[in-house]
Amino acid sequence: MADIQDEIRQEVTQNPVVLFMKGTPQFPMCGFSGQVVQILDYLGVPYKGINVLEDADIRQGIKDFSNWPTIPQLYVKGEFVGGCDIVREMFQNGELQAHLANAGLPVRAAG
C-alpha cells in the first residue's frame, strides 16, 4: 500500500488542485462528486480529476491518505480541503474562493 500512498502524494503535490472523485469531471458517477465538479467549474479553477472507480487501491488509498472516509476529496496545493459538504459550505460562504485565491489560483468572481 506504500506505493499507492506515494502515488497519491505525488498527485496532490504535483497538481495545484486535485479532486479524487467517482467518475470524471466530464461524467461524474455520483451526486456528491458532481456537486464538487459544478462548484470548481463555476469558479473556473483548473483541476485534475482522478476517478477512484478505476482503481480499488486508489479508492481505499485516498481514504487512508487523508484519514477521511468518503469520496469525493478535494486537495489544494497538497492540502486536504474536504469532501462535498465541506466544499459546498466553504463555497456558499466565500471561504473556498478565498482559499483558492490565497493559494495563487485563478478564481472567477461570483456574480
Image (spheres, helix red, strand yellow):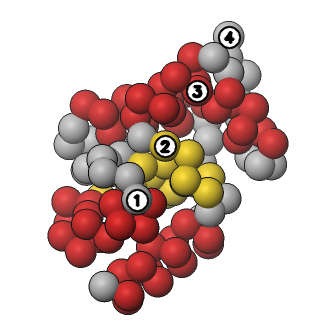
Quick check: 69 left or right of 90?
left
Q: Which residue is pictured at 41% across the width and 29% down the height?
A: 85
Three-letter amino acid code at the position of disc 3: Met
Residue at mark 3: 90
- Decide which of 97, 46 is in the foreground and name it: 97
Q: CA distance from mark 4 to mark 3?
A: 17 Å
Residue 16 showing in the rendered view: no
Residue 10 placement: quadrant:
bottom right
Give x and y (percent) for residue 20: 39, 55
Q: Are marks 2 and 4 in contact (CB under 8 Å)?
A: no
Q: Earlier in the sequence, mark 4 or mark 3?
A: 3
Alpha-carbon distance for marks 1 and 3?
Answer: 20 Å
Q: Which mark is residue 111?
A: 4
- Which SS class for mark 4? loop
Circles 4, 1 touching at the beta carbon (< 8 Å):
no
In the rendered structure, find residue 67 and report the number of the disc placed on it.
Answer: 1
Q: Residue at x 56, y 46 (%)?
A: 81
For disc 3, the neighbor class at 10 Å (few under 14, some 14 to 19, many from 20) is some
**Horizontal and vertical percent for residue 102?**
81, 42
Q: Indicate the amino acid at tag 1.
A: Asn
Rounded to the nearest whole Å, what is the CA distance between mark 2 and mark 1?
Answer: 11 Å
What amino acid is at disc 4?
A: Gly
Location of mark 2 (residue): 82
